[in-house]
Image: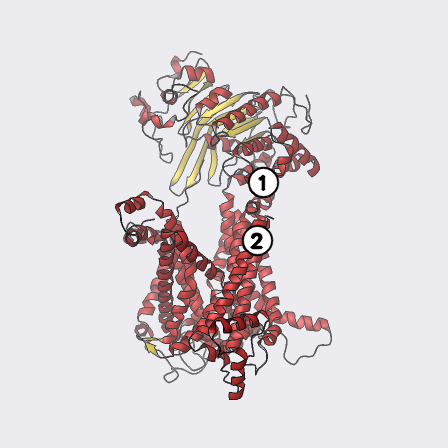
Amino acid sequence: MTTDPLSTDLPSARPTRTLPRQADPDAPLLVVEGLQTYFTLESGTVRAVDGVSFRLDHGQALGIAGESGCGKTTTALSLLRILPSNGRIVGGSIKLMGIDLVQKSENALRRYRWREMSIIFQGAMNALNPVQRVRDQIAEPIEERLGASSAEARKRAGELLELVGIPRARGNAYPHELSGGMRQRAMIAMALACDPAVVIGDEPTTALDVMVQAQILKLLEDLRYKLGLSLILITHDLSVIAETCDRVMIMYAGRVAEEGPVAQVFSHPRHPYTQKLLAAFPNIHADRRTLEVIPGSPPDLSNPPPGCRFAPRCAFVMDVCSTEVPPEATLDGVRVACHLYPPAEAIA
Amino acid sequence: MRLASWRDFVRRLVHRPEGLVGLVIIGVFTLLAIAPWLFVGPLETVTNASGRRLEPPSVSHLLGTDNLGRDVLNLTVHGARISMLIGFLATLVTIVIGALLGIVSGFVGGRTDTVIMRITDFFLVLPTFVLALILAPIVLEIIGSGEVLGMRTTLIVIVVVIGITSWATTARIIRSQTLSVKERAFVDRARVIGAGPWHTMRVHILPNVTGLIVANAVLVFAGAILTETTLAFIGLGDPFAPSWGQILGASQDAGAPGLGAWWWYVSPGVCIVLVVLAFTLIGGALDDLLNPKARRRR
Amino acid sequence: MGSRYLTRRILQAVLTIVGIVLLNFVLFRMMPGSPERISHNPHASVAARAALRERWGLDKPLFPDQFIDYVTATVQGDFGESFKFKGKEVTTVIAGRVWPTLILFGLGELIAIVVGLILGAYSGWKRGGPVDYGGNGISLILYSMPYFLLGMILLVIFATTLGWFPTAGMFTLGQTYSSFADQVLDFTRHLILPLAAVSLGLIGQYSILMRSSVIETRGEDYVTTAKAKGISESRVLRGHAVPNALLPTVSLIGINLGFIIAGAITVEVVFSWPGLGTLTQEALEARDYPMLQAIFLILAITVVLANLGADIVYGRLDPRVRT
């Protein structure tokens, strides 16, 4: 139990790390309500995230799943507010320990980036600066954000590398000199640099081969319990979520289809889309190619269909689905947004 | 990219503001270049100069006169013909050499490719302007002055020299494109059927690099005009067929900047800037058209 | 630095220089009318011309005799005597004109690189807004303008009309100086306009290059990561965006070096700056072939070496080529 961010003690419980001044110690870790993020393109406005809500508690791991383009990554970028210049949050709230990040100015927001929430991108892409040594990239936020000296920062960076299973000496290397798996580990080390409360992983294991993928997932598990981290794991691969997460949120076309404890959602999927996703592979630990089986394609988000966005592809579509947005209902602790489950009949 | 149809292509180009502005400017100058005498009468020379020497712009001489009393507007419009003609022909030569070598090199591959690329790299590093500078007087001496096919030999020499020294970049670009087109299935199918290399290159490769050739040609044209202007400026122009560069050179030799006779060289100068700018804008618009970068949205 | 990269580049440079020497030979000895072009000094007497033929061995067969003589002479820096300058050694004439060009273009390039890259980086990063549109517009116009035209315009405005600067030369003719400082001052006054002409043109080009490079880099994942780390915007620009955006820019600057020679020659002509540029024009006018040959060789080799320098700088900046 320590309040020193540079300490090497590894607390097994989270709550007594230094909270930001404005934090509400009784508030849940992360509550997102009605998040709306739109992109402005030449061709129009794309409503990439259109009313997403979820909650993350301390020490939990939430998986966000869905097809490409369903808004998972946009949600992640919105949390940290690192959207590209043509994107902006137009509505909703993101409450980190009770602090609404959406209302903060860019300057005020910076306090929370990396120190409370950090993110890991797909390492296979250019997520690491190609002309900077790995160790320096990890040390950078420690020096800049935590005010450490460069020597201290480098030392801490070395420790973080060891923590994720990279020999300290390899820190001298440049990203292109590391294998895909090592790069991913380095990014995890970097994400932990300021001892955050939440780590977001955006497709952290896609583009890695299966053995390496397993290692990375195990590493994330270990770190989660050692450091008391909360995780948000974004992926289109349901088997990863099944292995690692407590709760899962299925997204479709910028909205939440279903969300709840992993065991519940995977054993009794309610939303037709979730059913299709799961039906696509009979054994959750086998084939990863889930997406080709669902007929049709996701809607154009600059001109989404009124009502439920899955209606055009839904086997159970009713008239009301094409005109009214399905309201959320909660059944047995699982949230579903589908006209098949109207809220009036919901039993808690 | 395959050009579906010229009309569609031009229509899309016109929708972009830079493309439109560029096209209009080039259109105006092409008009002037085709028949300058329709706009300003015959080219003024020493013998039929219409004004007094070094007059600043006035109602009778909108752009003033030069040191021989010639109307600068007259000279400039006629200069458009020479400059644009040389630019056009030089671009033609450059593109033909560059595209030919590029396609052959990319398609045939192997040692031919290596040899051609070595030569291309050599020409890329070489300061081609200096080469042109040296080559021109030598070739001119060999050919002698006079007229060939209605064009003065000096100008032909300039065209050829610019072509010889500028093809390398085009060759590189076209070769890259050829390499990627070569990968595509239908080229293999053609080979399996037994189509000969020249046939394949002409029928399959060429249509797919045409778009790139056009985009490149636009930028080559801009460069050719700049090169011709510079060569003419330092003395390789023809005083009997004055291009804009030649007018600038003559004005410099007569000391125009020092004498304050700005109208003499600013007029052709502005034309040069406009034309080069126009081509650059069109080139930029074409670049957007041919390489639509997928909007990165995660 | 990876020695393989360095060795390969040096080898290429050497090969290119060999190619240039060969090309020079082709141009000046093998083209029709060539031997006479070298020896036939219109200003010299018949006897002197015969002596020249003897000296260059022009009666001997082209290969291997003339070629070997030629290469030997070139390596020793012997290019013969200038036609125009009444029999002075070409090398002597050139030597006297090198440093004005070096100063003008060395300084011009330096200023252009610093200002152009900073302007381009800022413009590309901020994207939009008056600095970007205005700066980009001006850069485009400068990019389309031959350098000498810019020079002529600057001359007529600032020298002829406003009288702030002299109109020609490097020093005031016939001036005697009471101190070294005075001499430097006079030199500087003469330097400013041609320097401005060279720099502005180059700044236009470099800022456009850097701007588009920075715009590309801005969209990269590691820049997004850097922003997510919460470090200051200026640090993201300085530490992440710029070092990566510099890479293609440096390459292009290197490639560009060959093309700015045209500008070099013509700007000197406009300002009567007594460097290699004006020398080239004079030699061209007088069809002084020995001089032209030497100038070509020197300029070409300089460009090759400058390209090599740019490659070395690139190697320092990008760790990926070193392995």
- Residue A269 left/right relative to C107: left
Q: Is residue C135 above or below residue A293?
A: below
**Numbered badge on residue C300:** none
**Marked residue chain, label 1:** A
- Residue C231 left/right relative to B219: right
Q: How far from the left and from the top, in percent, is residue B297?
A: 44, 37
**Numbered badge on residue C7:** 2
Q: Residue at x 42, y 78 (%)?
A: B141
Residue farthest toward the right in the current orientation of the protein = C179
Q: Residue at x 32, y 67 (%)?
A: B31
- Residue C38 left/right relative to B96: right
Which quarter of the rendering shows the C terminus of chain C?
Answer: top right
Name which quarter of the figure residue A165 lies in: top right
Pointer 1 residue: A174
Q: Could you say which is closer to the camera, residue C39 or residue C64?
A: C64
Kindly identify the amino acid type of the residue bearing the numbered disc 1: Tyr
**Marked residue chain, label 2:** C
Q: Could you say which is closer to the camera, residue C114 or residue C307?
A: C307
Q: Tag 1, which secondary structure?
A: loop
Q: Could you say which is closer to the camera, residue B50 or residue A244?
A: A244
The reply to whether residue A149 is visible in this rendering is: no
The reply to whether residue A9 is visible in this rendering is: yes
Q: How far from the left and from the top, in percent, is residue B41?
A: 32, 77
Q: Tag 2, which secondary structure?
A: helix
Kindly identify the amino acid type of the residue bearing the numbered disc 2: Thr
Q: How far from the left and from the top, in percent, is residue C118?
A: 57, 53
Q: Residue at x 56, y 61 (%)?
A: C305
Name which quarter of the figure residue C303 lies in: bottom right
Q: Could you say which is closer to the camera, residue A57 or residue C25?
A: C25
Q: Is residue B286 above or below residue A329?
A: below
Cα distance, mark 1 to mark 2? 22 Å
